Amino acid sequence: MPLSCFFLVPQIRLVVEEGLNQLPYTECTVTTPTGYKYEGVKFEKGNCGVSIMRSGEAMEQGLRDCCRSIRIGKILIQSDEETQRAKVYYAKFPPDIYRRKVLLMYPILSTGNTVIEAVKVLIEHGVQPSVIILLSLFSTPHGAKSIIQEFPEITILTTEVHPVAPTHFGQKYFGTD
């Protein structure tokens, strides 16, 4: 990972942790290795992550660091360079995704077109928009507004809303620019 992306890891972790705070949990008793009993919480079953490839994959490690056993699906969506329309090329999800809460990972929300297309694919697989939480690092007001207009039930978590979103996140993060 390039040094410039080293500073993004804590931001990814923060937005992932806040996304996890939105998921349902139950109280439980935890027994420590020394035998001490502690009142804690555990996530209810039925949560998963979905990364929009390729940039969304940068957020997967942050999710895995918090929830080692969480299932993660993937969607590959690319925009046509002439029309700017998003097209789905690949989608692979846990078979029971329609019963799960979904943390949708996409770090740079610019126009919102890619996320809207991803949510449509999730809906085709039986996921209700009300159980989708979009995790993003940088969002434009236009992108967030586009998503909320199309799917008002979706939750969007982001670290920053600014009229200009950074470009080429995936290339910079993975060092392929």
Image: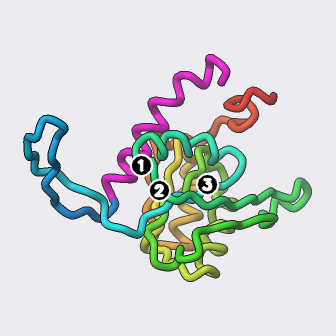
Residue at image mark 1: 67
Q: Position of residue 125 (x, y in %)?
A: 61, 79
Residue 172's image quarter?
A: top right
Residue neighbourhood size for the residue with mark 2, other residues' Cα within 10 Å, grouped as few (<14), some (14–19), many (≥20): some
- Was residue 64 drawn as part of the magenta stretch in this picture? no
Position of 83 compared to 153: left or right? right
In terms of sequence position, does the residue under pointer 1 or pointer 3 come before the other? 3
Q: Which range of residues does the magenta coloring cover? A: 1-22
Tell me the residue at 46%/61% (across/down). 133
- Disc 3 marks a residue whose amino acid type is Ser
* Res. 70 mark: 2
Position of residue 29 measured from the top left corner of the image (x, y, whole percent):
13, 54
Q: In the drawing, what numbered circle is on residue 51? A: 3
Indicate which disc, 2 or 3, sits on the residue closer to the N terminus: 3
> Is 72 rendered above or below residue 166?
below
Q: Is residue 148 left or right of residue 172?
A: left
Mark 2 or 3: in front is: 2
Q: Secondary structure at mark 2?
A: loop
